Structure formats: structure tokens, C-alpha cells
Image: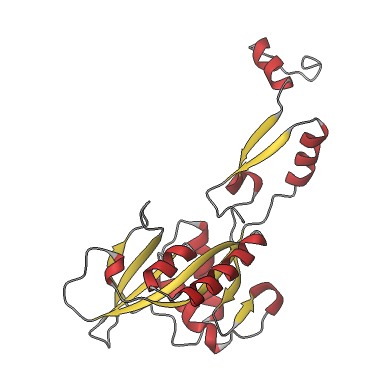
Amino acid sequence: RLGREKVLARSIPAVELLGATTVLCVDKTGTLTTNRMAVRHLWTEDAQHDVVKAGAAPLDEALHEVLEFAVLASHRRAFDPMETAIGHVGQRLLAKTEHLHSDWTLVEDYALSGEMLAMSRVWQSPDRSEYMIASKGAPEAIIDLCHLDVTRSEAIAAQAQQMAGEGLRVLGVARAVFAAATLPGKQHDFAFEFLGLVALEDPVRETVPPAIAECRAAGIRVVMMTGDHPAT
């Protein structure tokens, strides 16, 4: 049959093994999805905004700061699709506001690590002596950085879980102001204030649903491999 399809099999046992497959493990990002992320939701404890449903409607003032600091916590020349998406929506929804800061100078970066699933960027504003710190990362990491009480922590975690359950990748966003000349060695030493959540979507490739259906019809169970939150 393979020969009729003009396929040459170098190793017959490999073909036999392929025919006996019962479980297929597949990477998610860029394989099942398009790897072209877009911001879908912005959320604070006082307001929320669905970027798709809102269309050209202006962004509520209560959501300006969470998007502002999500942009500041991202690289200006982003290579990561998630940061690129945040930058694009920031330029669109914060245009002609005071919340975009092309004149701010980057002073320091605190990188994401296995111990702290959040990254922070330290900025110097031309008209302020204090440093402005923007942080984004896993909601649980941002909650931890902000030292929130149990009630607020649980409410924010529940919202993040709901968004993740809709297939979205969810980030927490926080800000801090630091007046000392010498920066601390770790992010936990800043007095962070929780700002809100940013949820992004990465659309599934059009060919994926029928391919998975074909696998299931052949008795093959498909398992998605991803570093995303389990609910996502």
C-alpha cells in the first residue's frame, strides 16, 4: 500500500510499529495551534474587556494600567508571540493616552526562573526619581509577589482558572515603585501592587480537528503536551 502511494519504507519494523500505535503525544504550541497569539481578555477586580467582542470600542479607564504595565513588562522588540501580542494590543488600545512610554529607560531585568514564574522590568521615567517596576507571569506567582490576603487571592485565582478553562493562556500583572538607589537581588523585595489579568488565545490550526477525529477513529488516543496551565 505504501509503495502504491510512492512511499519507500527504509525500515519495515518501524512501519509495523507505526501501524500498532495506540497513543499519540503531540506538542501544542505551533503544532496544534498557529503560534500566532492575540490578547483576548483584560481583567481587573473592577472591570473587564473582551478585545474581540468590544471591537473598536474604547478601553475602560479602569483597565488602562493593567495593559500599560503588561506592555512595560514585555520586551520592546519582542520575539515571543505572547509579548508581541501584548505590544500590538497596547499600541491599539492605549494610543493617544499617557500610558505608552517610549521615553522611559530600561534599567534592569529580573528573568523568569523555575523558582519564580514571573519576570520584572525596572524602568526610569524622565520626570520621576523613583524606579517603576512592571511584572508579569503566572497568576499564582504574581499573587505571591503581591502578598495578597486569602480572600483576594482566591477570587483572582478563580478568575484565572475560569479563563484558563476557556483555553486561554493567563498572565497576572503587577507594578511597584522603588525609591532606593541600589536595586534588590530578587523580585520579592519589591512592594508589588496587583493590577489584573491578561488572557491570550492561540487559535487551533484548521486541519487539527479532522486529524484528531481521524486518529480517534483509528483507535489512537491523542495527548496534548504543553507547558500551559492544566486547565488551559
Scheme of image coloration:
secondary structure
Q: Position of residue 67 (x, y in %)?
A: 50, 76
Q: Position of residue 228 (x, y in %)?
A: 55, 53
The residue under the point 40% across, 62% down is: 118
Side (left or right) of 188 relative to 142: left
Q: Nearer the viewer, residue 79 or 144?
A: 144
- In the displayed structure, would residue 13 be above or below residue 202? above
Q: Position of residue 45 (x, y in %)?
A: 54, 81
Side (left or right) of 4 relative to 122: right
Q: Quadrant of the C terminus?
A: bottom right
- Which image quadrant is residue 7 in? top right
- In the displayed structure, would residue 109 be above or below residue 11? below
Task: Please identify the residue farthest to the left as the structure is shown.
Answer: 181
- In the displayed structure, would residue 177 be above or below residue 141? below
- Which image quadrant is residue 15 in? top right
Tally the numbered discs.
Answer: 0
Q: Nearer the viewer, residue 160 or 9?
A: 160
The residue under the point 57% across, 76% down is: 43
Q: Position of residue 92 (x, y in %)?
A: 56, 77
Q: Quadrant of the N terminus?
A: top right
